[in-house]
């Protein structure tokens, strides 16, 4: 009863935007600073997507859950202190279930602490032009000074849609596999009830009331609607539907898309909170602890092949010479179909590639550097020299673009492979390597069935 009373007392605000152009179609109390509740997680996830894109962390990273994260109030995934869980599952839990423990764990994984992550959220918000927003945490539970506006949250929702389209469909999933459990979408009623709705985020606390940033597309028109201070889930959804209808009536049927300017990459603030990026290779875990101040675009380099026994001094000398190239390659991580349910894969895909292999040295190696070092190589097991090529291109950029698009299209068979734009006399070959013979042949059959050119690369190629 107390919660319902507080929800009715929460201030109301609304904002309706033509997502294509950013034009305001309706505004009511939209610049008043109010409690955003779990709408906050849109920024949490935006920063996580940015970190993955810039090679700060991998979707395969197994995040260690802290006592703080495990003790967050519901809604939560039910994580335990000391547990390890892949980053991709934390993303799904935060986006779909709005899990507070997952959100805190994400912030700690990216910036070392939730406080440092909140500072990064604020820098990113400022770069977006969210002038009236201040974040204090990653989850949105009520905290003094943790405030935003309906207009700022609409702006953030538009950036999520245009800046990270590969991840956006996460927000329309009715349910998702979060590793330890299957989670249901907090906004599934609206997604099912309103034609064209495909996201984005709900939020509720006593102080905030029932909040929602929703996006829907009909024909060539996309509308983003934000409501703060709803009295209940049902009344909030009804109000959002009413405002959505208003937006579709007022928006022109045709309009040139003017994407928002993507904010500058701000990274971590170097305040002393270390960023930890961990990648598992079989039973060995290699952890790199550092603070990232810059992010370079990925430029593939020749694959580094090491034997299973490597002296530490030789590794250090080699790494020192390849820091810059390794940084660039760090960004060449898999774009997780974090929005897709896991698919069964042939046994051949269990360990198609390994990252930073320092075998027979120690189960866990800590390397402190001013910049993160990531070395990727194809496994030297005899059945992993196969691969596929999806074309030859005039420029490296065209080859890398083709690799990325193909990886997103056919993740079931290409998951875990090494993407490589290899220079040749004809141009740049777009290759996926580190596969077994059966895996390569299966990938080519599936790609060919989708009208994507594909040739198998043999060990002798």
Image (cartoon, rainbow, N blue to C red):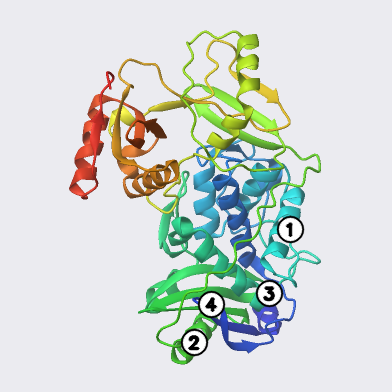
The residue positioned 58% from the left and 54% from the top of the image is: 76
Residue 208 is marked as 3
Q: CA distance from mark 3 to mark 2?
A: 24 Å
Residue beneath label 1, please? Answer: 123
Residue beneath label 2, please? Answer: 247
Mark 4 surroundings: few (<14), some (14-19) or many (≥20) residues within 10 A: many
Q: Of discs 4 and 2, which sits in the foreground?
A: 2
Q: Of discs 3 and 2, which sits in the foreground?
A: 2
Give the secondary structure at mark 4.
helix
Q: CA distance from mark 2 to mark 1?
A: 31 Å
Mark 2 surroundings: few (<14), some (14-19) or many (≥20) residues within 10 A: many
Q: Are marks 3 and 2 in contact (CB under 8 Å)?
A: no
Nearest to the observer: residue 337 or residue 6: 337
Q: Is residue 343 visible?
A: no
Q: CA distance from mark 4 to mark 2?
A: 21 Å
Residue beneath label 4, please? Answer: 233
- Whether residue 47 sits left or right of residue 299 in the image: it is right
Q: Of discs 4 and 1, which sits in the foreground?
A: 1
Q: Quadrant of residue 324?
A: top right
Q: CA distance from mark 1 to mark 3?
A: 23 Å
């Amino acid at each position: 009863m107390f919660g319902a009373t507080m929800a009715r007392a929460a201030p109301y605000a609304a904002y309706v935007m033509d997502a294509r152009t950013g034009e305001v179609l309706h505004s009511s109390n939209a610049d008043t600073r109010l409690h955003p509740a779990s709408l906050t997680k849109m920024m949490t996830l935006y920063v996580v997507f940015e970190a993955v894109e810039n090679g700060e962390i991998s979707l395969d990273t197994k995040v260690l859950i802290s006592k703080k994260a495990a003790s967050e109030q519901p809604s939560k995934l039910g994580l335990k202190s000391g547990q390890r869980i892949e980053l991709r599952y934390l993303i799904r839990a935060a986006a779909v279930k709005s899990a507070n423990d997952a959100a805190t764990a994400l912030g700690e994984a990216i910036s070392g602490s939730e406080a440092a992550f909140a500072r990064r959220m604020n820098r990113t918000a400022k770069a977006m032009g969210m002038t009236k927003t201040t974040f204090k945490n990653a989850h949105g539970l009520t905290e003094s000074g943790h405030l935003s506006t309906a207009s700022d949250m609409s702006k953030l929702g538009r950036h999520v849609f245009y800046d990270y389209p590969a991840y956006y469909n996460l927000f329309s999933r009715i349910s998702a596999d979060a590793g330890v459990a299957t989670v249901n979408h907090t906004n599934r009623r609206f997604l099912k009830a309103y034609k064209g709705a495909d996201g984005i985020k709900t939020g509720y606390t006593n102080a905030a009331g029932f909040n929602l940033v929703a996006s829907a597309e009909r024909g060539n028109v996309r509308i983003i609607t934000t409501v703060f201070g709803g009295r209940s889930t049902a009344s909030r959804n009804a109000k959002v539907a009413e405002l959505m209808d208003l937006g579709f009536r007022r928006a022109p049927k045709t309009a040139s898309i003017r994407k928002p300017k993507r904010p500058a990459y701000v990274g971590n603030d170097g305040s002393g909170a270390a960023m930890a990026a961990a990648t598992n290779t079989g039973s060995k875990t290699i952890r790199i602890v550092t603070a990232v101040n810059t992010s370079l675009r990925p430029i593939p380099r020749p694959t580094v092949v090491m034997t299973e026994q490597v002296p530490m001094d030789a590794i250090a000398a080699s790494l020192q010479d390849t820091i810059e190239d390794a940084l660039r390659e760090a960004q060449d991580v898999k774009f997780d179909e974090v929005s897709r349910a896991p698919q069964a894969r042939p046994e051949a895909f269990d360990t198609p590639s390994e990252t930073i292999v320092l075998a027979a040295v120690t189960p866990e190696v800590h390397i402190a550097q001013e910049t993160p070092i990531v070395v990727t190589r194809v496994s030297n097991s005899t059945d992993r020299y196969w691969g596929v090529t999806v074309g030859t291109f005039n420029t490296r950029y065209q080859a890398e673009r083709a690799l990325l698009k193909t990886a997103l299209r056919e993740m079931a068979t290409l998951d875990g492979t090494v993407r490589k734009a290899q220079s040749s006399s004809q141009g740049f070959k777009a290759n996926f390597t580190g596969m077994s013979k059966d895996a390569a042949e299966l990938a080519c059959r599936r790609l060919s069935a989708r009208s994507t050119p594909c040739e198998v690369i043999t060990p002798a190629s």
